[in-house]
Amino acid sequence: MVSSAGTNRRLGGRFVIDREVGRGGAGVVYRAWDTVTERQVALKLIAVDPEQAFLEEARLAREAQILAELDHPGIVKTVAHGLLEDSGLPFVAMEWLEGADLALWHRREPLNMSQATELMILVGEALEAAHRGGVIHRDIKPGNIFLCRGRVPGYDLDFFPKLVDFGVAAALDRKSLHGIDVVGTPAYVAPEQARGDASIDARADIYSMGATLFELIAGRPPHVGPTMIATLARLATTLPPHLCELRRDVPAELDSLVYRMLQTDPSDRPSTVGEVIEELREVLPQTARLSWMEPLEISMSTRLGSSASRLVTSIVAIGLQKGSALERALEQLRARGADAVPLGQEAIVAHLGARRTVGSEASAALDLGRRLARSGARVGVASGRARVNLTSPKGEVQPVGEVVDRASALARDAEPGTMIADVTT
């Protein structure tokens, strides 16, 4: 890994380094001059073991070929890729962009609701072009939406977005969280990605697009836990909040659209980005009439529907064996009435008492937790109140976030082969 680079330092006999502009777990990004194309580029060096360099280079070559075919003004362009001659490190050089990513921009110059809606229409148009080309981003988030100064005809914005880390992010941002392999960023990743589903389609990007829009309007992502594991457990198993729970001035149509984009089951979301764009265009005039925090007299019951509260016990198990062992554990949990889903390939989150309460959920959870621990897992069990959506045909439940947070924290603190339960359980 290159630790630093001074002004005018040359890398790979090709790139003249200006300055470092970013650093993360996947590598480091420089502003550099490409002496071959005679263009300013964003040069990203990939941190991998030497024996993995050629495999990474081949993957980058495939991604670059795909991106070269995605000719859209809202998608950053690849200039070059390969292995540096001097170090052998894989690299990808992208067009240099002037501006800031959406996360930084929004902190400095917060977008109002109308601007956020227009921005997501433009982001959606870029995603729609990518999906037509057979490419799924899988890591849409404010940090991967770069805003450049300038205007787009027909839009009341003084910036325009470009999607970055397109396709590359899916492999490079894989994180291992105490035995949970995750592709993407926990606060924005689609539930099917958190569960480790084999089949991921364009609706995963629709979820992440909804999570980003939710944060722009509400000031926080839809699911936030004290740890990455807790965040994943929430989004994989619980209903998303409504925007109107955090801001009363959200138009009902926008609230409904974002809520559908954030559904745990992909089949409950809009099926294409084109549908999302169409609905955003329809609601845009309503957002334009609103000031930033204009209060509206809206009945919360008309949006949230009928709900009730009940006691739910949550189980989080980390470090299970992959494959058949994980499947058997899921079957055992579901046979005892638990709503259980995998987190990645080596973890499980489950809730007892979500659909119906018989009074023995806590003791059943302790028994199931002991069984999971005997297989070598680290298990946490916690109990607390949950809000149940009585009008949902699927009988969905939204456990109080604090409960699954506690179960996640207990699992994280447990030793392999042990279970920790909270006092309530």
Image: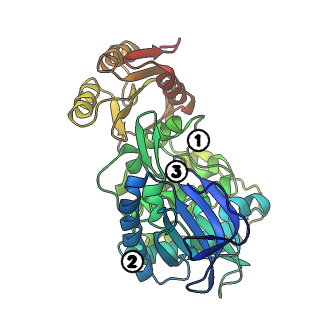
For the point 27% across and 28% down, which residue is it?
A: 329
- The CA distance from mark 2 to mark 1 is 36 Å
**Nearest to the observer: residue 212 or residue 242:** 212
**Nearest to the observer: residue 68 or residue 141:** 68
The tag on residue 65 is: 2
Kindly identify which residue carries mark 3: 185
Determine the secondary structure under disc 1.
loop
For the point 27% across and 29% down, which residue is it?
A: 334
Q: Nearer the viewer, mark 3 or mark 2?
A: 2
Q: Earlier in the sequence, mark 3 or mark 1?
A: 3
Left or right for 82, reference 20: left
Kindly identify which residue carries mark 1: 224
Residue 372 lies, in percent from the top left, at: 32, 21
Determine the secondary structure under disc 3.
loop
Residue 129 shows in the view = yes
Q: Nearer the viewer, mark 2 or mark 1?
A: 2
Residue 396 lies, in percent from the top left, at: 40, 40
**Whether label 3 touches label 2, CB < 8 Å:** no
Residue 135 lies, in percent from the top left, at: 39, 70
Q: Amino acid at mark 2?
A: Gln
